[in-house]
Image (cartoon, coloured by chain):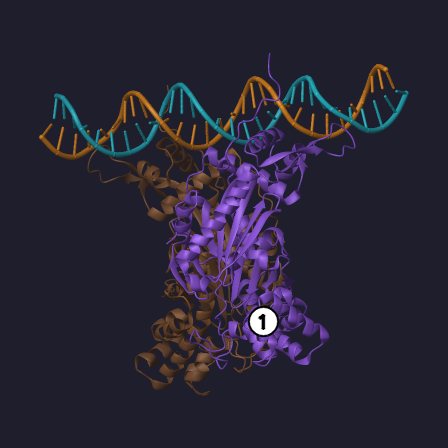
Chain colours: A brown, B purple, C orange, D cyan
DNA sequence: CTTACTTTGATGAACCACCCAACGAAGTGA
DNA sequence: TCACTTCGTTGGGTGGTTCATCAAAGTAAG
């Protein structure tokens, strides 16, 4: 499956690695002078100067004033150049398409949401819409004079990231959709700069890059909505498994006698903790909170109001879901020993009523006290995690290999005689 | 926790990477001429010649005759030099200490087993014994004129590989034992060349390097004995988790109403599939197979005989364990999506009576048909997997960085005038 | 036996990236 | 104004890879 062939290391690769090192250092530590970059990265001052000037010519970094000098010559600060290299994240969901454009600094350049009945529209028509959205984003990027690093699409389902194919997205009722090919054909961007990935994987990436677990290398991200998905990061690298289907935690069977699930088994985790289950437990069928015309955010607002008011049935339901969440998390923590678990999707919205119950279950079920110390955090990115992760992913390729970014002709500062 | 600081890439690192590339190519493809190495690795012929001559001077490779030429000048074959660089694997178990010395070709140079009541002896005295065993192995290595790459100790428990500390080994009743420090102090070997790791992790490494799942990059290795441990490999890299405790699958709670476990929970996987459970289900308390003075291998022989004879109670017990094995594996496969699952320890010995039951459970419980395609294989290394993995691990450091191996003075082939 | 052809592996020049040391530049403090 | 400190650039040096070339060592055919 995987190629395994490692290309030989050459001087170009060496250069690439050190360019990426400077970019990463800047990402992690913010604005720095060349001398500080040298100290932080371990590279010599001479090399840093050289690398920075190349990064400048590729518009990945730019000058940013002087260090507040206390003594000696002040340093010339350098920062990741905002608004010159952008990543485009797209998201396909049951109810809408969404797009976000991020720049290297992580700030949102533009975003857009297109309500859409994806299931009814079918894959091909949906792809048309997606491409139109992408073109609109590309136009915006061009309008602000930036360079689009790439597009990454977040999909709620099983994705073959190598081939760029959505293998199976049950909620969308998609099967074997060549999304990357379809998108690249409709948009003026080379194939290599388009990608698809699972939404939970991308959410994990976003939380790792700029979210709740910023900088945590061993990370588990659980995203709850109509289903449950997990994104895994081990030693900073996404764990996809042999065929890209790792993290399918929704149908872990936690109780052989539990309620049956459409998947054919009993006691699936998803059937204990997804939003539908919470609603069923906390309300009667005719309760307005279950009104099918309600958007997810409205439903959550109602739940929050009731929980804040101390409504017994709501609180009990939240405890039940929190407990079940903890049981499943304990299992995953035993297997993966993450430093942090980020709760995304609707779990983040109801975090304060869920965590404690989950924590109690985890504490009693995780063998090693060190592993049990895993932080359980609410996502700071909420429902935008996946799409931000998509944009980050698109930029990551350039940050890992800055020579991909085009060199712009620099006007000479002085005309020679 | 983890340092995160990536050292800058320099030319020495470049050299290192390419030396390692040649070694790896040789490992994967066996004897090759320089020209073939050039083609396989992507390096130029000039560079390959250069690299090979350095590897020769460090005695990692040696000449191995000529290619069976069909036309043109025959190539000068080069192979990983057997018997010149050795890795030493040690294993601590309830009943014995064991040592194996492997060379680069993967052949066993020597091995030794020391029966020992580890629990009764206590950690320090056990360490003394371990050090003596290590010294004996080092003496053997020296006697055959080889260079010891390092020592890696396999321990059944939670290990902090960074610090070289056994955090907790319940079966041995060890807690917070600074094994690497203790060993290095007693043996004439620098600290950096001693390591400890979990036995299941090392078993996974061995199965990946030279065992049942040779070359499979996404691998799960389940080792059954008195407890159950798992070793994980994702994209060829061991998954250890944030504090090195990933793979603690023994106490996954698969059934909230299951039998209680000393760990405090119910329905732990270990209590459903470990050897003790199998014995309890298949036999009465006074059955000779349960004789406490019996060694594990003898017990297994009896079980095999009964199973082959078609003993109903034995077969039923094997089915029960096989089913439980499958239930847990299904869960792990959903989370990790490995390409192969290797059954080690006693599961390998009873493989033929366990697999089918496990496979049925997996097929019905794994959501994605692609993920369910994971191969369930018996370990080909059996109880020696962990220790072989230890020796491999010790050599891996040198194979990844051949400059660690000392240069030996080469006698000139001809005396000049 | 000689000649042509093929393939291998070694050699030397060229290139490229990094590092070190030294230096000028640009501030602060006495 | 003069030390002093720190910054960033410059030039020379080292090391590693590649390309082009060439001798070496075989086979195949006349």
Q: Is residue B401 found left or right of B287 in the rendered image?
A: left
Label 1, secondary structure: give it. Answer: helix
Q: Is B134 placed above or below A268 here? A: above
Q: Position of residue A117 (x, y in %)?
A: 54, 70
Q: Could you tell me if residue B326 is visible in this image?
A: yes
Q: Is residue D8 found left or right of B214 in the rendered image?
A: left
Q: Is residue A217 found left or right of B287 in the rendered image?
A: left
Q: Position of residue A350 (x, y in %)?
A: 37, 73
Residue drawn where x is 34% and y is 41% of the image: A40
Between residue A276 and residue B52, name the one nearer to us.
Answer: B52
Q: Could you tell me if residue B354 is visible in this image?
A: no
Which image quarter is the C terminus of chain A in? top left
Kindly indicate the quadrant of the structure image that contains residue C21: top left
Q: Position of residue C1 (x, y in %)?
A: 86, 15
Which image quarter is the N terminus of chain A in? bottom right
Between residue A118 and residue B342, name the one nearer to us.
Answer: B342
Q: Position of residue B72 (x, y in %)?
A: 76, 28
Identify the residue position indicated by label 1 in the image.
B325
Between residue B277 and residue A344, name the one nearer to us.
Answer: B277
Q: Is A181 placed above or below B267 here? A: above
Residue drawn where x is 52% and y is 46% of the image: B137
Residue drawn where x is 41% and y is 77% of the image: A323
């Amino acid at each position: 499956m995987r190629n395994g062939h490692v290309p030989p290391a050459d001087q170009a690769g060496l250069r690439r690695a050190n360019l990426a090192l400077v970019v990463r250092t800047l990402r992690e530590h913010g604005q720095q002078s060349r001398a500080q970059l040298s100290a932080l990265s371990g590279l010599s001052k001479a090399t840093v100067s050289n690398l920075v000037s190349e990064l400048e010519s590729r518009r990945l970094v730019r000058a940013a004033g002087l260090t507040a000098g206390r003594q000696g010559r002040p340093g010339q600060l350098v920062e990741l150049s905002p608004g010159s290299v952008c990543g485009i994240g797209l998201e396909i969901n049951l109810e809408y398409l969404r797009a976000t454009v991020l720049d290297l600094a992580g700030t949102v350049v533009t975003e857009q949401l297109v309500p859409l009945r994806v299931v009814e529209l079918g894959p091909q028509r949906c792809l048309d819409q997606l491409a139109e959205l992408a073109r609109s984003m590309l136009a915006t990027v061009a309008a602000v004079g930036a360079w689009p690093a790439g597009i990454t699409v977040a999909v709620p389902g099983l994705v073959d990231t190598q081939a760029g194919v959505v293998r199976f997205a049950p909620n969308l009722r998609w099967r074997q959709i060549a999304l990357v090919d379809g998108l690249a054909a409709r948009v003026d961007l080379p194939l290599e700069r388009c990608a698809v990935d699972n939404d939970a994987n991308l959410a994990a990436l976003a939380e790792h890059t700029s979210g709740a677990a910023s900088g945590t290398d061993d990370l588990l991200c659980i995203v709850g909505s109509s289903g449950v998905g997990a994104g895994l990061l081990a030693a900073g690298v996404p764990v996809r498994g042999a065929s890209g289907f790792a993290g399918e935690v929704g149908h872990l069977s936690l109780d052989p006698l539990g309620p049956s699930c459409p998947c054919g088994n009993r006691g699936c985790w998803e059937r204990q903790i997804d939003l539908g289950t919470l609603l069923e437990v906390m309300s009667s069928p005719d309760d307005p909170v279950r009104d099918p015309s309600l958007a997810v955010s409205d439903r959550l607002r109602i739940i929050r109001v009731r929980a804040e008011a101390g409504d017994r049935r709501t609180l009990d339901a939240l405890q039940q879901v929190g407990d079940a969440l903890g049981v499943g998390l304990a299992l995953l923590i035993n297997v993966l020993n993450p430093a942090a678990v980020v709760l995304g999707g609707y779990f983040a919205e109801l975090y304060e009523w869920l965590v404690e119950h989950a924590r109690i279950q985890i504490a009693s079920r995780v063998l090693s006290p060190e592993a049990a110390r895993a932080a359980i955090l609410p996502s700071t990115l909420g429902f935008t995690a996946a799409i931000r992760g998509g944009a980050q992913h698109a930029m990551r390729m350039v940050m890992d290999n800055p020579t991909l970014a085009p060199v712009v002709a620099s006007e000479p500062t002085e005309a020679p005689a």
